[in-house]
């Protein structure tokens, strides 16, 4: 499911799948319950959820928190936290370059009895270990280091993973680079 469905900025429905957060999250509840009906009890079900879409009329951290509590109460096994979208990269401006959604994930983790997985900006083994060991987050997710260097897991296990240094890229088209923020640094 696209994160846009949960965002009031994008979801303009006026039926029982729109208009307010209870209605908007109904689709998540129904999908989850449908999966549980056709799978064994030990089948693991998780969701990826934005912490916010960083739009003034959009899906907020308060909305996300309410969805997390609701899905946790229903019995979902884990929730993976991310945020923003390709049009709204504001979160990049407020981060130190790693663990973009750590503060929100910590708040969520202490409020529910399911694992919260943090993703977004984790490119070094040190940062990943810190989030789990010192920040109280149950799991981390990281894609870029493993896509750009498929040997990353093996290097981590061997203790020789040095992290991933991403180049500062731009498209060369000023209006696009400005829209993406940081001169296009979020583009790979």
Image (cartoon, helix red, strand yellow):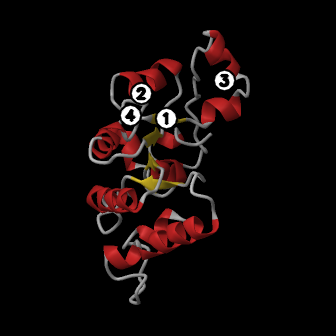
The answer to whether marks 2 and 1 mark residues whose Cβ atoms lie closer than 8 Å is: yes
The answer to whether marks 1 and 4 mark residues whose Cβ atoms lie closer than 8 Å is: yes
30 or 60: nearer the viewer: 30
Residue 119 disc label: none
125 or 176: nearer the viewer: 125
19 or 85: nearer the viewer: 19
Residue visible at 40% across and 62% down in the picture: 74
Residue at the farthest bottom position: 15
Return the x and y of residue 32 as percentages of the image width and height: 51, 66
Which residue was labeled with disc 3? 153
Return the x and y of residue 46 as percentages of the image width and height: 52, 53
Residue visible at 48% across and 50% down in the picture: 77
Up-down relation of residue 13 to residue 142 (above or below): below
Residue 137 disc label: 4
SS state under label 2: helix
Choose mark 4 or mark 3, whichever is in front. Answer: 4
Among the two numbered marks 2 and 3 on one chain, the one whose residue lies closer to the N terminus: 2
Up-down relation of residue 81 to residue 168 (above or below): below
Density class for disc 1 (Cα within 10 Å; few <14, some 14-19, many ≥20) is some
Residue visible at 39% across and 22% down in the picture: 133
Which residue was labeled with disc 2? 132
Density class for disc 2 (Cα within 10 Å; few <14, some 14-19, many ≥20) is some
SS state under label 4: loop
Task: Kindly report the distance in space between the C-alpha atoms of the residues bearing marks 4 and 3.
Answer: 20 Å
The quarter of the image holding the C terminus is top right
Quadrant for residue 22, please give it. bottom left
């Amino acid at each position: 499911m696209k994160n846009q469905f949960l965002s009031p900025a994008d979801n303009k429905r006026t039926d029982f799948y729109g208009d307010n957060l209870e209605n908007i999250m109904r689709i998540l509840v129904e999908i989850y319950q449908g999966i549980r009906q056709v799978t064994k009890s030990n089948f693991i079900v998780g969701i990826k959820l934005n912490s916010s879409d960083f739009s003034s009329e959009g899906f907020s951290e308060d909305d996300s928190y309410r969805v997390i509590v609701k899905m946790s109460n229903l019995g979902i096994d884990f929730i993976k936290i991310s945020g923003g979208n390709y049009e709204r990269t504001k979160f990049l401006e407020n981060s130190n370059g790693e663990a973009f959604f750590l503060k929100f994930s910590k708040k969520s983790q202490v409020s529910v009895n399911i694992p919260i997985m943090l993703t977004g900006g984790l490119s070094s083994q040190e940062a990943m270990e810190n989030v789990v060991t010192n920040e109280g987050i149950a799991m981390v997710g990281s894609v870029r280091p493993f896509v750009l260097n498929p040997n990353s897991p093996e290097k981590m296990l061997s203790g020789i993973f040095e992290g991933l240094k991403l180049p500062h890229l731009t498209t060369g088209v000023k209006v696009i680079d400005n829209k993406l923020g940081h001169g296009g640094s979020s583009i790979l």
